[in-house]
Image (cartoon, helix red, strand yellow):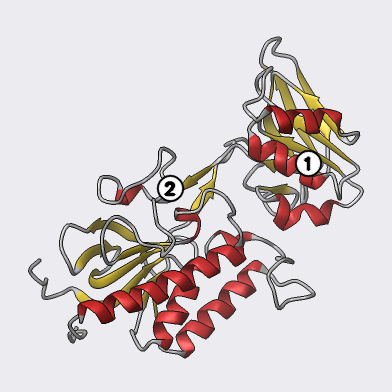
């Protein structure tokens, strides 16, 4: 690929500023690769939207999601990582260096680490966004503890909804699972566990049409999809588990993905294109935890370092 005179040529370009991106940046920076991080729309990734993270090692009293993101960033930059506050809009992985077009700049990268994450699917109803983090959540392991002895509603009918709903029972006084159909998509084993659990109830053939509350969730509006009947249902919390969508659309037809859009990687975080690595929730449909995403980011950077050593990449050109 001919070098664009205005393009910034970097050894390692990292897409995403969440735990994946900044863990990768930390390891790449310590390897003196001068990595550049494109933050994307949300500095700190989805983790930054979590009010308190209590399950990240090293913080026995918990840590704010935004604060943890700032610590990740500061540590990576301490060793030489550079943060660019812009989003990647398109990529060309057909030749090396790889070309990435962002909001304000073009980049040519000898190695690329994709840490663009995944976004939870939303219901798209009134009150949902306004009360996210104030009783509305998309992560039971992140926020379940805050609902000790409280009444909680879980929305969804797949494995995630029932798994997370059962997880919340260790804290909540009751868990009501709301599903738009009569039948669940979840596995029979999970269905049986949920149906037998004394804390779990079900409202079927029903959708949530509104989240109600001022500074916190106080109730939800439910609508029966068969009769059309609507009721106001009081609850302390609303957990929404209707799937995640990986933020991988720009890599379509370039990187191999599964049927859900998660980038396929091997145990070394390698994609189907040598020199392109993926980690965290963009490539992880299973765990979706801050600590696992950070570990995958570190592994991707280690492998990128080895790749660059093996290929004897050219030094960074002046910009």
Going from N to C along the chain, the mark reached first, 1 or 2, is: 1
Is residue 84 visible in this depiction of the protein? no
Depth check: 250 or 313 in front? 313
Q: Could you tell whether 64 is left or right of 12 in the image?
A: right
Q: Could you tell whether 74 is left or right of 270 in the image?
A: right
Tell me the residue that label 1 is attached to: 166
Depth check: 150 or 214 in front? 150
Residue 18 place in picture, x, y as percent: 51, 66
Tell me the residue that label 2 is attached to: 262
Mark 1 secondary-structure assignment? helix
Give me the residue at 23% from left, 73% from top: 110
Q: Could you tell whether 232 is left or right of 103 in the image?
A: right
Residue 15 place in picture, x, y as percent: 38, 65
Give me the residue at 82% from left, 56% from top: 146
Structural crowding at the residue carrying mark 2, measured as other residues with C-alpha within 10 Å and reported as few (<14), some (14–19) or many (≥20): many
Structural crowding at the residue carrying mark 1, measured as other residues with C-alpha within 10 Å and reported as few (<14), some (14–19) or many (≥20): many
């Amino acid at each position: 690929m001919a070098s664009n005179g205005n393009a910034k040529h970097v050894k390692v370009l990292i897409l995403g500023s969440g735990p994946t991106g900044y863990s990768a940046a930390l390891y790449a920076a310590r390897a003196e690769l001068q990595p550049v991080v494109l933050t994307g729309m949300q500095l700190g990734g989805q983790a930054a939207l979590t009010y308190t993270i209590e399950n990240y090692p090293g913080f026995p009293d918990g840590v704010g999601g935004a604060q943890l993101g700032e610590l990740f960033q500061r540590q990576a930059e301490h060793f030489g990582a550079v943060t660019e506050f812009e989003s990647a809009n398109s990529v060309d992985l057909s030749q090396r260096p790889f070309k990435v077009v962002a909001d304000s700049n073009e980049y040519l990268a000898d190695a690329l680490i994709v840490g663009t994450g995944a976004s939870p699917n939303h219901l798209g109803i009134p009150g949902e966004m306004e009360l996210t983090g104030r009783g509305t959540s998309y992560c039971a392991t992140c926020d379940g503890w805050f609902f000790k002895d409280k009444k909680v509603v879980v929305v969804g009918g797949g494995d995630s909804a029932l798994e997370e709903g059962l997880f919340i029972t260790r804290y909540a006084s009751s868990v009501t699972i709301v599903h738009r159909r009569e039948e669940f998509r979840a596995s029979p084993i999970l269905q049986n566990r949920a149906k037998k659990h004394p804390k779990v109830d079900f409202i079927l053939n029903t959708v949530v049409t509104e989240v109600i509350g001022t500074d916190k969730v106080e109730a939800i509006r439910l609508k029966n999809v068969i009769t059309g009947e609507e009721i106001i249902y009081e609850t302390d919390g609303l957990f929404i588990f209707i799937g995640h969508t990986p933020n991988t659309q720009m890599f379509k037809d370039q990187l191999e993905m599964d049927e859900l859009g998660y980038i396929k990687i091997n145990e070394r975080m390698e994609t189907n294109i040598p020199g392109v690595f993926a980690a965290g929730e963009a490539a992880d449909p299973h765990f979706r935890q801050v600590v696992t995403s950070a570990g995958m980011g570190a592994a991707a950077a280690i492998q990128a370092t080895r790749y660059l050593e093996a290929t004897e990449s050219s030094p960074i050109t002046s910009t």
